[in-house]
Image (cartoon, rainbow, N blue to C red):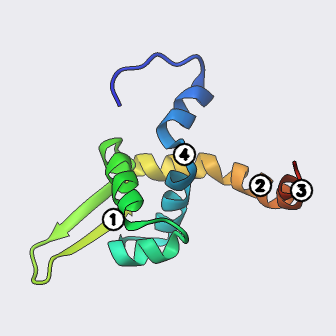
Amino acid sequence: MGRRTYTCGLDAAIDLMGGKWKGLILFALDEGPLRFGALRREVAGISERVLILQVRELESRGLVHREAYHEVPPKVEYSLTDFGRSLLSAMEPLGVWGEENMERIEALP
């Protein structure tokens, strides 16, 4: 991500979790660790390639932890870090607002 200067806290938060998929990935991991296939099923509509890229970015930003188990076949689980959980907590009111206003938002031109 590199060093950036932000104009406000909202600017920093949106940069960290920006895009359609990152918030949905964080919400999917809220219930606990998931393997890649289960995570993909939880995040409906995401392609495997995009999920890989998004999870790597979330991991590099310290929001998601990747745990690789040395087994055959290989097993990898993804979970929220404390930093990721704190961002998810901040996003929850926005999700509630979206639920409350979804019909109005969907009706917009």
Q: What's the CA distance linking mark 1 and mark 3?
A: 36 Å
Dot 4 falls on a residue whose secondary structure is loop
Of the pair 76 and 32, the residue shown nearer to us: 76
- Where's residue 41, x and y in %? 47, 77
Which mark's residue is nearer the viewer, 1 or 3? 3
Residue placed under numbered mark 2 in the picture: 98
Residue placed under numbered mark 1 in the picture: 78
Q: What's the CA distance linking mark 4 and mark 3?
A: 21 Å
Judged from this view, the residue extending furthest toward the front is 109
Which mark's residue is nearer the viewer, 4 or 3? 3
Residue placed under numbered mark 4 in the picture: 19
Residue placed under numbered mark 3 in the picture: 107
Which residue is pictured at 35% across the width and 53% down the height? Answer: 53
Q: What's the CA distance linking mark 3 and mark 2?
A: 13 Å
- Where's residue 29, x and y in %? 46, 65
Q: What's the CA distance linking mark 4 and mark 2?
A: 16 Å
Q: What's the CA distance linking mark 4 and mark 1?
A: 19 Å
Residue type, numbered disc 3: Ala
Residue 8 lies in quadrant: top right
Q: Is residue 79 above or below residue 60?
A: below
Q: Is residue 103 above or below residue 58?
A: below
Residue type, numbered disc 2: Gly
Marks 4,3: beta carbons within 8 A = no
Q: Is residue 58 visible?
A: yes
Of the pair 67 and 45, the residue shown nearer to us: 45
Which residue is pictured at 87% across the width and 48% down the height? Answer: 109
